[in-house]
Amino acid sequence: MMRVAHVVVAGEVGGAERMLVDLAVRSAESGAEHTVAVLSPDRRVPDLLSAARLRVEARRTGEGPLAFLGQTFGAAEVAWLASVLRRERAEIVHVHTFASQVVGTRAARAAGLPVLRTEHSTRAFDERACWPFARWSLARSAASVAVSAYVLGVASARAPWATRRMRVVANGIDADHFAPSPWPSGGPLRLAIVGRLEPRKGVDRAIEAVARSPGVLLDVVGEGALRPALERLAHRVGAGDRVRFLGYLPDVRPAIAACHAVVCTSRTEGLGLALLEAMAMGRVAKARDRPSPVTLVAKAGDLHARDVLAPGDQSRARRAAGDGATEVDERVGLQFQPARRVAPAATSA
């Protein structure tokens, strides 16, 4: 089997890390043995991977821009990563997330190994501060995988010279793990939003929408630097008693099962893993198509389990949702019409 070393540099657990678990635990299907090297200030990142019984090498790092620059241009993290690659006898280095691209590529070059990148989002290509770093790594990568056609389009527009080395390999989920669950009975309409609490995810938009919708509840699943600002926003717009911040959850299924719909209000989104999980569990999934293009369906609108599941799983999911799915579909559609004003307080705080 090929020996693959994955490099993850992350401040907290997000969709990229959860997707990596699903990939790396399947050695037989992937034809590879997997090791994960983690640089993170949050112990929960390596813990997630270790809990899946993966081979994990972890090094604690600082937080913030200065820590990123230090590990990107410094020698210590590169030397540590290169030693991991040699010790694990890696044959290829697979880098995930923007922060891993330069340090992972430098370590791979030091060890004389090829680099594969997975583009989990468009951040590396459409944020001006990120592109110089991403470009350096991309120019030295053997291949690049985009998680959706949308991500590939953004990447190709920014780096047409690299298009021939790019391919789309769409993220997937374990439909047995995220099996349909009974539709919530009684109570008010409950929405959930799952993801890192960062500006690109647009959680402030979901809070604003709930504030305009009396009686609707919102569960926010995830951690990130914006949490304090988002909590203040919820109280400022009068929704503090209807928005719950659940923080990081190692298993998101109970939160999805407790809600009627999962929403995505991202300003830009590579794929939207939580929407796939919601659909598999028989929940309505609602996404705004502008200005956050989500490429799970061919056109803007509401997403249902039938869009991504095999026929047998479709019927199971629809039975789990029951007749209430149509009602939730209509109510969420009303609440997530484009607003006249989206308060930027959370993203500017």
Image (cartoon, helix red, strand yellow):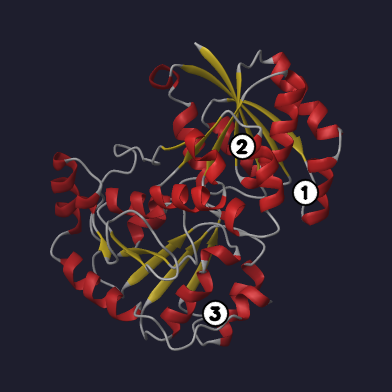
Q: Is residue 6 above or below residue 233?
A: above
Between discs 3 and 2, the one toward the N terminus:
2
- Residue 205: mark in rendering: none
**Residue 132 at what x, y percent from top left?**
71, 50
The residue where tag 2 is placed is 47
Between discs 1 and 2, the one toward the N terminus:
2
Q: Is residue 120 above or below residue 336?
A: above
Question: Is residue 7 found left or right of 294 in the rendered image?
Answer: right
Q: Is residue 136 above or below residue 287?
A: above
Label 3 Cα neighbours within 10 Å, binned few <14 / some 14-19 / many ≥20: many
Of the pair 309 and 58, the residue shown nearer to us: 309
At 56% from the left and 52% from the top, the residue drawn is: 158
At 27% from the left and 65% from the top, the residue drawn is: 302
At 53% from the left and 74% from the top, the residue drawn is: 204
- Using the rendered image of the protein, determine whether residue 8 is visible from the camera's viewpoint: no
Extreme residue toward the front, this view: 161
Q: Comparing marks 1 and 2, which lies closer to the viewer?
A: 1
Between discs 3 and 1, the one toward the N terminus:
1
Of the pair 261 and 241, the residue shown nearer to us: 261
Label 1 Cα neighbours within 10 Å, binned few <14 / some 14-19 / many ≥20: some
Tag 1–tag 2 contact (CB < 8 Å): no
- Using the rendered image of the protein, determine whether residue 258 is visible from the camera's viewpoint: yes
Question: Which corner quadrant of the image does residue 301 belong to?
Answer: bottom left
**Residue 328 at what x, y percent from top left?**
24, 71
Report how far apart the C-alphas of labels 3 and 2 lie in the structure: 31 Å
Query: Disc 2 residue type?
Result: Asp
- Helix, strand, or loop for circle 1? helix
Query: Disc 1 residue type?
Result: Phe
- Residue 68: mark in rendering: 1
The residue where tag 3 is placed is 234
**Residue 78 at what x, y percent from top left?**
79, 31
Question: Is residue 234 found left or right of 148 in the rendered image?
Answer: right
